[in-house]
Amino acid sequence: MSQYLITPGEPLHGTVAISGSKNASLPILAAGLLSKEPSTFEGIPVLSDTAHMMELIACVGGNVDQLDPSTVSVSLSEDSKRKTPSLELFSRLRASFLVMGPLLARTGRARIPLPGGCQIGARPIDLHLKGFSAMGAKIKQGHGYVEARCDHLMGNRIYLDFPSVGATENLLLAACLAHGETIIENAAAEPEIADLARCLSKMGAKIQGAGSDTITITGKDSLSACRHTVIPDRIEAGTFLAMAAASRGDVTLTNICPNHVKPVIAKLEEMGFDLEAGEDFLHISPCEKFRAVDIKTLPYPGFPTDMQSQFMALMSVADGTGVVVETIFENRFMQVPELLRMGAKIKLDGRTAVIDGTRKLSGTQVKATDLRAGAALVIAALAAQGETRITNIEHMERGYEHFVEKLSSLGAKIEKLETE
C-alpha cells in the first residue's frame, strides 16, 4: 500500500506543465481499433487508467505498441486474435466499454464485461445500448457481460435522454463505419468529444457538429491511420489552480487551453483571485483572503462535476458560506467525511452541501475514496495545520501524471510512502 505524506510549507510557487487529457486519451486509444493500420497517439499521460485501457485493447485483439512513455500506436488487423475478456480487467475502468463501438463497427460483434471505475454513482450503459440498437445491433445481457451483434451497423437518428459523454463517444466511434448517416441529438459537448472527432477526421471520418449538441456522421467503408496529439487535461489544470489557490500560491500553468477551464476561472475570479490567461498558459496570483461561492455542477460548458470535490475543499478555507449542488452523480460527496475529519464545516442535504469556511483545518490521516476526492484531500492538506497522510492513493494515480514530482517542483512538501 502507498500513501502521501503532506507537510504544510510555503505557498506553491513556480511553473507546471499540464499533461495530456486522461478523458480524451481513453476514447482516442479505442479509436485506433477502427483501422487495420496503426495510428499514433501522442501526449498520452502515464497513468494506471491509460495502462489498463491499452491492456484491455490488446485483450480484445488490438495491436498496441508503446513507442515511448507518452506515444502509443493502436490498430486492429483483419486476423487479430481475441482473448476471452477478463471481468477483473474490465471492471477496473469505466471507459472499458468504449471498445464496444469500434469492435461492433469493424467486426459486427462484441462481447464485453460490464465496466467499472470510481464508485461515484450509477453510470448506466443503457444509452450506449439504445444507440447501438437503433443502429441495428442485437443486444443480449447476462452473467456480467453485454453482447452485441449485427451484419452491419446502419446510420440512424439517435436522441440521448441525457448528454452522456461516454455514450456520445461510443456512438460516434461506431457511426464512423456505419452505412449511411447518423445524427446524435442532445450529444455531450465536452472538449474531449471535439478532440475525439478531430482524431477521427484525421482517420478519414466525416463528422460535423462535434462540440455542439447535434453531431452528424456520414459513415465510411474504412478508416486509415493518423497521428494525433491529445488536448491538455482541463481537470488536472483545474486541480492545480485549486491547489495554488488554497495555498495562497503564485503559479503559472503551461500546456493548457484556457477556454476549456472557463467555468473554473469564472468561479476563482468570483472568489477574489486574479488570473491572467494567454494562448497556452494561465497564471493565478495569490489572494490572502478569498470568499466562498455557490456552485452547481452541469454538463459542459457548465461547472464540471470532476471539479466539485476540489472546490469544496477550497471553500472549506474560504471566508463565508458556499453551497455546492451536484446534479450529475448522486454519490459524489464521498470526500465530505474525510474533510470533516480535518475540521471542515460541511452539512449535507441530499445532493446539496453547505460549506462554512474556516482557516483551522488540521492535518490527520484520511483516505481517498475516489480520484477527485483524493485531489480534494491534497488541497485541504496544503491549507491545513500539521501533517496529513492520505491513503488509498491508487485512486489518485488513475488520473494525475507525475503528481508528486509536479507538486514538489512548486515547493510542496509531499512524499509518497510505501507501507505494508
Image (cartoon, rainbow, N blue to C red):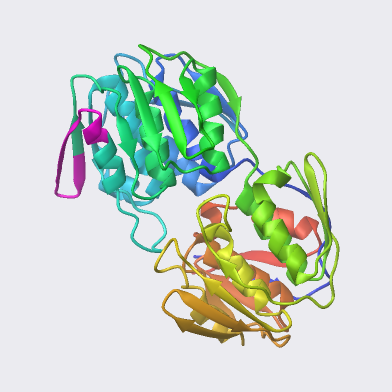
Position of 238 with respect to 197 (left or right) is: right
| Residue 355 position within the rendered picture, expressed as x and y whole percent measured from the top left | 60, 82
Position of 325 with respect to 63 (left or right) is: right
Q: Where 198 sits versus 203, above or below?
A: below
Q: Where 89 sits versus 264, above or below?
A: above
Question: How many numbered discs?
Answer: 0
Q: Front-most of 50 and 413?
A: 50
Residue visible at 62% across and 72% down in the picture: 294
| Residue 58 position within the rendered picture, expressed as x and y whole percent measured from the top left | 37, 31
Residue visible at 66% across and 76% down in the picture: 315
| Residue numbers of the magenta segment | 132-146
Position of 312 with respect to 106 (left or right) is: right
Asked whether residue 169 appears in the rendered view, the answer is yes
Q: Front-most of 303 and 380?
A: 303
Position of 47 with respect to 64 (left or right) is: right
Asked whether residue 100 appears in the rendered view, the answer is no
Q: Front-most of 397 and 371?
A: 371
| Residue 12 position within the rendered picture, expressed as x and y whole percent measured from the top left | 81, 64
**Which quadrant of the view contains residue 141?**
top left
Residue visible at 67% across and 85% down in the picture: 362
| Residue 192 position within the rendered picture, expressed as x and y whole percent measured from the top left | 54, 40
The magenta stretch spans residue 133: yes
The magenta stretch spans residue 10: no
Residue visible at 35% across and 28% down in the picture: 174
**Which quadrant of the view contains residue 108?**
top left
**Which quadrant of the view contains residue 145?**
top left
